[in-house]
Amino acid sequence: MGYKVAVVGATGNVGREILNILSERRFPADDVVALASERSVGHEVSFGDDTLKVQNLDKFDFKGFDIVLSSPGAKVSAVHSPRAVKAGAIVIDNTSHWRMDPDVPLVVPEVNPDAIAGYVKKGIIANPNCSTIQMVVALKPLHDLATLKRVVVATYQSVSGAGKEGMDELFNQTKGIYVNQTAEQHRSKFTKQIAFNCIPHIDVFMDDGSTKEEWKMVVETKKILDPAIKVHATCVRVPVFIGHSEAVNMEFEHAIDIDEAMAALKAAPGVTVIDLRSDAGYVTPQECAGEDSVYVSRLRSDPTVDNGLSMWVVSDNLRKGAALNAVQIAETLIHQYMQDAA
């Protein structure tokens, strides 16, 4: 007997990827339903070799469902995640709404799987921000080895992190520029032209001058990995369709040898090291699209601080940065906490 699973936000980039990954990984589900807003009702989405008709989230009765994988907007999650929990489901939520709730675990299975047990408080498990997920997967083995003091990260985030509208805007601006159209004719999602450009602005600005995306990386890393780690982030949107990249600079409490660090990363779950220190001996976002790993390249010492290292981290933000991480949480949940319910 399998589980009954509902996918909320099934017509979005992440929702579609969740359905794809559930099928790929043969998640033990007897029933999978696709839910979205009223305007998407009746549309079809792929689930492996099958198609599912989208049902109305507002009218859906979650009674009898075991797991809800939720990727709508934060405001929608605030309404419907508690409704699903009240009906008896456990919600794995990919929005920002629940991440910093002290009663909701924020989980990356390769980093803090034991935190999943905290779902009993509210019936909700939060999926972290995409840029945070790939960074902490790469940081975890190094933190275990030498204890991180400080992390300074610059991100290069693809437009798919802004949804289908972001991807469409990059495509239309790029195409338009080649036929002598201005970027402004195709600009609605981003604050400036994204084609052939970089925008150091993701999410809203905060009082201290940082953006909310940068704030998320700070507070989520502390909640997931270690509250003592100091984190400073600069988050940049770049004209790449899929795949986030990060230049990560680290300072450790203890001496850390490059060979030891390399060995720890190679042994870490979810990490693939490709660092040949030669032309093309590193991974770019174009190459990681469709892949599950967090890729680490260009690992090297930073001589400007004691016990310093730098590395380049790349991952598919729609897979490990969102959908795959959510499905991995669900897999851990059923294997460790729900076996008797099946």
Image (spheres, rainbow, N blue to C red):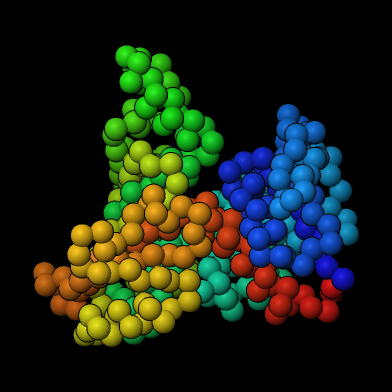
- Left or right of 59, for residue 121: left
Task: Please state the horizontal and vertical placement of residue 161, each as a whole percent of the image.
Answer: 47, 44
Whole-percent x, y for residue 224 in the image: 48, 69
Work out whether residue 61 or residue 14 is closer to the camera in this orientation and state it.
Answer: 14
Work out which residue is located at the far top of the displayed protein and give it: 180
Answer left or right for 144 relative to 149. right
Q: Where is residue 291 in the image (x, y as percent from the top left)?
A: 49, 59
Q: Image quadrant of residue 64?
A: bottom right
In the figure, is residue 5 to the left or right of 249?
Answer: right
Vertical comparison of 137 with 87: above or below: below
Q: Residue 9: give x, y in percent of width and height.
A: 67, 44
Answer whether residue 86 is visible to the viewer in this image: no
- Residue 165 versus residue 126: which sits nearer the camera? 165
Q: Is residue 70 left or right of residue 307?
A: right
Quadrant location, the C terminus: bottom right
Identified at 68% across, 52% down, the residue is 19
